[in-house]
Image (cartoon, rainbow, N blue to C red):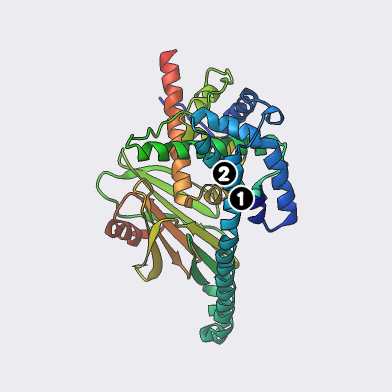
Amino acid sequence: MKQMITDSDIAMAAKAVGQSMRASLPDPKLCPYDPTPEYVDRILTLAEMNCSRQYSSDKKLWVKRVAAVFLAGIIGAGAWLSVDAEARDAFFSWARHIYENSIIYSFFAGERLDELPDCSVNWLPNGFEQTMETGGQASKTKVYSNGTSEIYFDWWLVSDTTENAFLSADAEIRNVRVNEFEGDLLIPDDTEMTSELIWIDSEKGVTFLISAYLDESELIKIAESVSYD
Amino acid sequence: MLVYLQMIENEDDKSKFIQIYRTYIGLMFHIASKYLINQCDREDAVQMAFEAIIRNIKKLSDVDCPQTHSYIVITIESKSIDVLRGIQAKAGVPFDDNTEGLSIDLPGDNGLADALAQLPARYREILLLRYDCGYTTKDLTSMLGLSRGNVQKLIWRAKAALREALEERRDFC
């Protein structure tokens, strides 16, 4: 029978390994460092390049400021929000901003549930079965495996001012629909990385994420089979 | 150091970075030399590591604390392996994903700690960042430039590899 290894077992072992690792290396203060003239030249060249990179950093800041104004506009101008106080509290408004290498979901309004509802995935590709389940009151994960590959299913609560960021460096981002909800599919250029499908139940304030080495149709089929218990 | 300082806006962060640079740069080159023969490649790895340190400067504690020390060692090890991977890819040599981490003295428990110390670099690194340095999954998404799902996957695989390594040690004994 396989022995269970708990997180606290791993934490104790990691502390011991960390200590050994630091003790195995020379004292940082005693390591000589003497840069070659060529390295100094490279750093100076990089300094010049960085000045032009500052321009694109400023551009990103400009995009963020525009996005903030846009968000303020949504809050101010949304007619349906002013009609019914209960509707304003019940539903989450959210906005998605796609930057150079990340998607940020910003949430506002809405009343957070006290506890995250349990969910089940009712369709999986052949051979997959649940192998793990973890989580607490605000976020949960289920893992499914077919012996060679895994599917990760995460879901978590959002609330007013929550921001969830997904890094999507070198990935194609496709807007998709999961039943009645809007979602994003991230397909990485690096085949070592999983594809990811994110969608949001704005009524309950729950974000869902599926990560797996599967194609778009299978990911959406899994996502559309998700139900609250 | 000029270029690194230009990337940091906050004065406190700049001061912290200067201390990190002065304290650890020699050690970083020492570690890079374990993987990379060519001085230019070592400089590339150290530069990549400093760029990662700058991006995560706000998550780092005191310069001399064990957590920061471990983070810097793990970061330069990881970037050195990345440079090595790039060199081998250019040469058409397949890269071994189970490349070993720095050779370190085993803790000596003949159990979980020894097994963890001997894991492939990528698994040892993620478990040390998570459980020795104490970074959360959320911290690690931005520190490593991975999505939350992929960080979780990496941790899960590292734990599975650790479990397997421990079982093998027990069978051998």
Distance of label 1 from label 2 (alpha carbons): 13 Å
Give SS at disc 1: helix
Reading the image, the residue beneath label 1 is: A44
Q: Residues within 10 Å of mark 2 (few under 14, many from 20)?
A: some
Number of marks in picture: 2
Q: Is residue A111 visible?
A: no
Residue A118, quarter of the rendered image? bottom left
Q: Label 2 amino acid?
A: Gln
Residue A135: which numbered mark, if any?
none
In the rendering, at what x and y percent does residue A134 appear? Answer: 48, 45
Q: Is residue B61 visible?
A: yes
Question: For the residues carrying marks 1 and 2, which lies nearer the camera in this image?
Answer: 1
Q: Residue furthest top?
A: B173
In the rendering, at what x and y percent does residue A182 appear? Answer: 40, 69
Q: Label 1 amino acid?
A: Leu
Q: Residue at x 31, y 39 (%)?
A: A148
- In the picture, the quarter occupied by the C terminus of chain B is top left
Chain letter of the residue beneath label 1 in the structure image? A
Residue B47: which numbered mark, if any?
2
In the rendering, at what x and y percent does residue A125 appear? Answer: 27, 50
In the rendering, at what x and y percent does residue B9 appear? Answer: 68, 58
* Closer to the camera in the image, A85 or A42: A42
Residue A118 left/right relative to B8: left
Q: Residue at x 41, y 20 (%)?
A: B168
